[in-house]
Image (tube, rainbow, N blue to C red):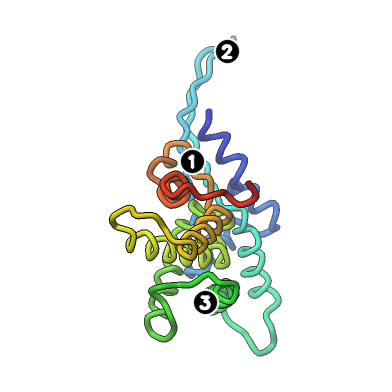
Amino acid sequence: MELLDYLNRHFYTLQQLLELTQVSEQALRRYQNQDAMPLCSYRLRLDIGCDSFFGPHREQDEIEYYARGYAAWLALLHSLETHPPKASRGAAGAKGYPIFYRRYLDAMERLQAHGQLCHNLTSGPTLDAHIEREWAHFLAGTYGLCTRSGLPEDIAAKELAISAINAITTADELDSELDEQQRLKLTRAVNLLDEVSAGFAPHERQRSSRHRLVDEMRRRYRLQAQGA
């Protein structure tokens, strides 16, 4: 089953996540209820039928799948709760967003320093509101689905890349040839998006941002993939 193969290759089941981090399910649910830990990105519902010498058997099961990067985030939250810095007491949930905000901002600054420009975000209230929206998507498990790690660094890279791609291609409404500078910027943005985007589950690929903004951009503008 292609979907199951994809999930097992690229995600941790709930049980694997708990075993890897040595965090209890009770603690995980508490962090989720505190709006500190993302929800699962996929929930697989199984209706199992079995026939054997003893006759037919049916059972139902449900498996939660989490982005593999969430193991590091869960371990961080648990560490903050169990071994908090002396100057920083309180529930892990209260610390989650400031950490996300700082890491997201640091990632943006590093990428912009290396030439990745964000065309609709600068600083101040607009940026703060943007990161708050990103935090909400992070908690919902959305970025565990569409980025490789689901963590702030990949989320920031994805948003910067999409912003750059949209800015360049929207200005190219007549499908005219890109000049050398535009082509370089578009290639850089598409390669960045390719680097941080998930592969997407088989049933999602044709509707995904990867198909629209990586595969189609390379086809339409004859861009060379990184390392090709």
Residue 122 appears in the rendering: yes
Q: Please name the residue shown 28% across and 55% down the image.
A: 174
In the displayed structure image, the side of residue 47 where residue 153 appears, left or right: right
In the rendering, at what x and y percent does residue 201 appear? 48, 41
Contact check, label 2 and label 3, Cβ < 8 Å:
no
Amino acid, disc 2: Ser
Amino acid, disc 3: Tyr
Reading the image, the residue beneath label 2 is 52
Q: Please name the residue shown 53% across and 45% down the image.
A: 199
Q: How many marks?
A: 3
Reading the image, the residue beneath label 3 is 101
Mark 1: which secondary structure?
Answer: loop
**Mark 1, other Cα within 10 Å: few <14 / some 14–19 / many ≥20:** some
Mark 3: which secondary structure?
Answer: helix
Q: Given this view, does label 2 or label 1 mark the residue nearer the observer?
A: 1
Mark 3 or mark 2, which is nearer the start of the sequence?
2
Q: Nearer the viewer, residue 130 or 112?
A: 112
The circle on residue 201 is 1
Residue 133 versus residue 88 in the image, above or below: above
Q: Please name the residue shown 66% across and 64% down the image.
A: 75
Mark 3 or mark 1, which is nearer the start of the sequence?
3
Q: Given this view, does label 2 or label 3 mark the residue nearer the observer?
A: 3
Residue 95 appears in the rendering: no
Q: Please name the residue shown 29% across and 57% down the image.
A: 173
Label 2 vs label 3: CA separation? 54 Å
In the rendering, at what x and y percent does residue 82 appear? 68, 73
In the rendering, at what x and y percent does residue 12 appear? 61, 47
Amino acid, disc 1: Ala
Quadrant of the image occupied by residue 113? bottom right
In the displayed structure image, the side of residue 228 where residue 165 appears, left or right: left
Q: Nearer the viewer, residue 52 or 199?
A: 199
